[in-house]
Image (spheres, rainbow, N blue to C red):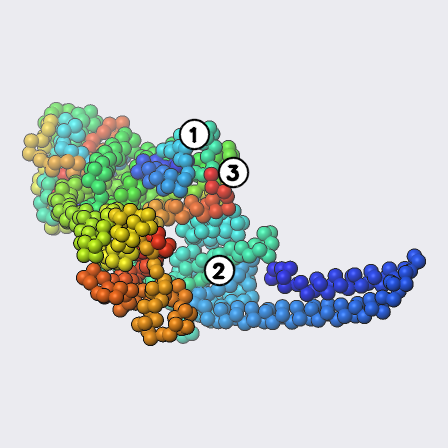
Amino acid sequence: MKEEEINVFVNGVVHYFETMAVVPAEVSSPYLIDGLTGSIMEYTGVIGITGEYQGNVLFTAPVEMMAKLLALYDNQEASVGALLDLVGEIANTFSGNVREEFGADFQISPPLVAHGSPKEVRTAEGLQTYCIPILWLGMRANLIVALR
Amino acid sequence: MRITIKKYYGLIAATVLLLVCTLGLVASRGAFEPSIVLRGYAPLAVFLIVIALVALIAQLLTHTLRVEASLASNNAEINHILASANEGLFLINKDFEIGRQKSARVKEIFGDGVDVSGNFFHLLHHVSPQTEIKLAREYVELLMAGRVKQQLMRDINPMQEVPIEVTQPNGGTVQKFLHIDFTRDESEHIDPKQPRALVSITDITREIQLRGELEQTKEQQQERLDLLLSVVNVNADELDAFFNETKENLVEINSVLAQEGAEHQDNVEKLASIATMVHRLKGDASALGLDFFESAFDHFEESVSLVKRNMYIDGRDMMALTVQLKEIINEVEMVKTITPQLRSVGTSQLKAVETEISSIPDRLLQVAQRAAENAGKHVDLSCTGFEVLADRPELARKMDAMAIQLVRNAVVHGIEAPVDRLDQNKSPLAMIRVNLAKEEARYKMSVLDDGRGLDFDRIRAKVAAQLGMDEKQAEKLDRGKLLHYIFQPGFTSLDEATVDGGRGVGLSLVRDEANNLGGRIAVKSSPGKYCQFAVTIPLAKES
Amino acid sequence: MVVDDSQVICRQIEAVLSKQDFDVVSTAADGVLALRDFRMLKPDLVTMDLTMPRLDGIQTIKQMMIIHPGVRILVVSAVKDKATALRALRLGAYGFLCKPFTRFELAEAVDVLISDLGKT
């Protein structure tokens, strides 16, 4: 998988923050992770991908960031349900961006959401998964690209 | 032209004579009481002065003529060189002004429309605007300054591949590539304050094209094969160490990427420490001859410097590095997994070669002893050094074959019968030493025996007999000629052929084989003491 | 004296120099270590990498030329950047050898480097 292709996902997230949040997000340098342990935060949205590449792309964020983001949507109560809903929304939004870029070959499933570690996601052994930190207002979310 | 006393001794003699005679004349006419003897010599002195003057003038004249002749012939030579040289040649001075003399090729290289004169760098900029003139000029300045060794600057000559646009007679333009080389003029008469350099320009357009084509094919097909082969050639422990260190370093690079900080400056720092690590990895791979990994790290290094060029470095710019890091990690893992299998194939072959080589001393000893037995002689043989050919099984076989011939030759011709040896106070057990050594640019095999040495009288007699020469003609054959004959097919100094010698093919075979391998054979000998044949074979070019 | 951040390279250079009857008085993995030893030992000959942690080759050469201007420095580096290599030579290095190199090339370069001196 090429850097441009992975950056399509990153741009999706950046675009989301640009549009929704007043302060833009910053992208830190991507690195490799072995499995998801340690990289998953409280709220995670997962999209599944089939086609030329197969696997998952995850957006995972801490509760504080989710609460701040939720606050941008007028008068929402920061319940677990609402936060899960939002993280699904974020995943949904940037997966839409991705579809635009990759075209029809790229099959993207509707997002799954998880509070805690998502059980459905399996990644290859070794340093095979990309983790891209997204920094916003001093908080950090991760975009995780686990595709083969 | 250097002045030597020898060349001028005529001139000096004439001048000395002139001085002596003049002094004599002055003395004889001087104010003090002239002696009769001296006065009587005055006409003679005048006569001698005239002779000396004539001699002096003649000397000066011939000298002038000689100098002119040699200048004329020098000029003719220079003109010939300039007309026929394959390179574009001219001199530049310290202000980079191009000299008047240019080789014919210069015009061809730059095309008719370009005036090759004036400042060299103006010309260079004119024909190749994309070349960095500042760098090129710094290089030439450094070269002219003379401190840096010019042989050790060639690699960083920034003008090794200069692209130029050449206007053709029909008005179109073609791109050419030039290799421009500079050599500081180190002749003695050059004033160090006025240095000059010879510029030699080669048109390498065709080479560049070929290289491009070759590289493409090579990259596509050979890369993996090279990788596999290079891995087999590296010592197992070193390779394991390399894989482990590389893996550690790659993990380290990953943790640098994982460090906090998304600002431009954070990334600049991350890049700096990654660059250092990648550079070291590249060096290690290159030191072990692992071309594949070397080029992978080279590529990585290049990506790092590409990312560095961004005005503002964002995490997304760094993505290229992470992707490459993953690829390299996978390559290392892949090679690590398949190496044991590759190695088992490789080592079984190596083992076979090793056994074959390790049996060479035994076989040579057998050959020597059998030949000695047949001739009623006693011989001991030592053989060392063949293991340097462990990586060249084919050559090992050929060297072995040559050694067998030379050992036989030593037993049959070199070594005396035990009785004769006792007569000369030598041990009846003769010694033969076979040694093979790898020297800087060649293999050298020597076969030394402590026998009678070459018997030139006997060889001369044989040569004369075989060529039907009479005694007088035979006496004219010097040792060099005779040595030449002993390597000719059909020559033998033995009267009767045996299994082991006397057919006159042994030495000629060895010489032919040595020649086939690009090497030569030489012989040293001292009568009654020893005879040594030495075969030298150049190392084949290292791939 | 051999300055290079790779142990593999240091060992290789050391082996070649010892064969040529040089005493390798020190090997250093970066410019800081190199300068520390250089002050004490004042070696005649230094092989110098350019890309190193802490203090790079260019800075190290600069310092060395101040401490002991008579030193002969051979830059041994894979830098493709000719401007940097030229800079090293302008600062006082006597020659440049491009990595990767064979033992023979290194030996030859060292010979050239000291061609106008008596070997020590």
Side of B45 relative to B283 (left or right): right
Q: Position of residue B191 (x, y in %)?
A: 60, 54
The chain to which mark 2 is attached is B
As drawn, the label of residue C70 is 3
Q: Is residue B248 above or below residue C20?
A: above
Amino acid type, callout 2: Val
User: How far apart are the alpha carbons under marks 2 and 3?
Assistant: 31 Å
Looking at this view, is B78 or A99 the one in front?
Answer: B78
- Asked which quadrant contains residue B510, the reply is bottom left
**Residue ID for mark 2:** B199
- Residue B198 in percent (x, y) is at 50, 59
Question: Mark 3: which amino acid?
Answer: Gly
Q: Chain of mark 3?
A: C
Closest to the observer, B502 or A139: B502
For this view, does B431 lie left or right of residue B100?
left
Q: Chain of mark 1?
A: C
Q: Amino acid at mark 1?
A: Asp
Give the image quarter of residue A96. top left
Question: Which residue lies under the disc numbered 1?
Answer: C37
Disc 3 from disc 1: Cα separation: 16 Å
